[in-house]
Image (tube, rainbow, N blue to C red):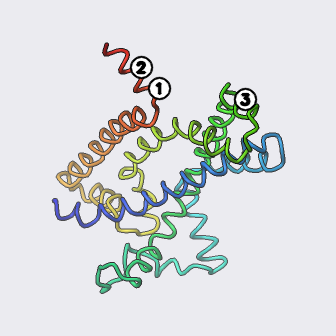
Amino acid sequence: MSSILLRYLPWTLFSAGLGLFCSFVLGLSLGMLMAYRRGGVIDHLLTALGSFFQAVPNYLVAIVLIVFLGVQLGWLPVTKMRGAVSPGLQPGLTVAFVTDVLYHAALPVLTYVLTTIGSWMLLMKSSTLSTLEEDYVTVARARGLSDGRIMRAYVGRNAVLPLFAQVAIAAGFVVGGSVVIERIFVYEGIGFVLLDAINRRDYPLMQAIFLVITVSVIGANLLADLLYSRLDPRIRRQTAEGDR
């Protein structure tokens, strides 16, 4: 049982984790741009795109990528991209192995990015707009600081704090949220194995995977609490005052 988990779990952690990281970074950047360009064409366009991708199910995006990029346009050889790695390729920190892993994970990662970036964009925009109304931002502008320095030192750092807790929680659902995507792309991760175990009624394997999912969610929630209190000095100050 443990050998199956150790064989397939790393591929899910890699693909879904990479997708979550890319969508988080891009969502923060675009969300801050939307806040600074609020009311303009860029803001309206990105808000519409973010709302659209947030509402579209991930399995539908995966099917559209296969149909249009793989079948209609023929840009991607989707049949050759099946699996987590090419058969016979020796694992190692080599250019050939890393390139092959990224090649097979490209479509799942792209699906994860497209289906999660919208929520990060909208959340970051809302958080940035709220931060721009704080008194310390007004004081910083009165001191004559440039917009770039205010954005880096004051707005961006404080606006991203509420999102760190949410990304930690989202990371906990990485294992369980990959079932349909891995089956569509035939990407051999833990989600692929879970669906296969359900079809075969392999209850011991299902219980083991569900245990991993449960532990990851609980651990991510604990990490979110610890991370938020560590990043936000106001939480530490309130905790220290409460202990007195």
Please name the residue shown 40% across and 51% down the image: 174
Q: Amino acid at mark 3?
A: Thr
Q: Helix, strand, or loop for circle 1?
A: helix
Q: Gap in Å between the C-alphas at discs 2 and 1? A: 6 Å
Q: How many marks?
A: 3
In this rendering, would 11 be left or right of 117?
Answer: left
Q: Position of residue 216 (x, y in %)?
A: 31, 45
Relative to 140, is 11 above or below?
A: below
Q: Residue under label 3, please give it.
A: 138
Assign a secondary structure to mark 2. Answer: helix
Amino acid tagged 1: Arg
Q: Is the C-beta separation of discs 1 and 3 under 8 Å?
A: no
Could you tell me which residue is drawn at 62 percent across and 46 percent down? 152
Q: Residues within 10 Å of mark 2 (few under 14, many from 20)?
A: few
- Determine whether, in the image, residue 49 is placed left or right of residue 189: right
Q: Look at 43% across and 26% down and name the residue there.
A: 235
Question: Residue 196 or 158: which is nearer the viewer?
Answer: 158
| Structural crowding at the residue carrying mark 3, measured as other residues with C-alpha within 10 Å and reported as few (<14), some (14–19) or many (≥20) | few
Q: Using the image, tell me which numbered label, if any, was put on residue 234.
A: 1
In terms of secondary structure, where does tag 3 sit? helix
Task: Give the quarter of the image for residue 122.
Answer: top right
Instruction: Name which of mark 2 and mark 3 comes first in the sequence.
Output: 3
Labelled disc at residue 238: 2
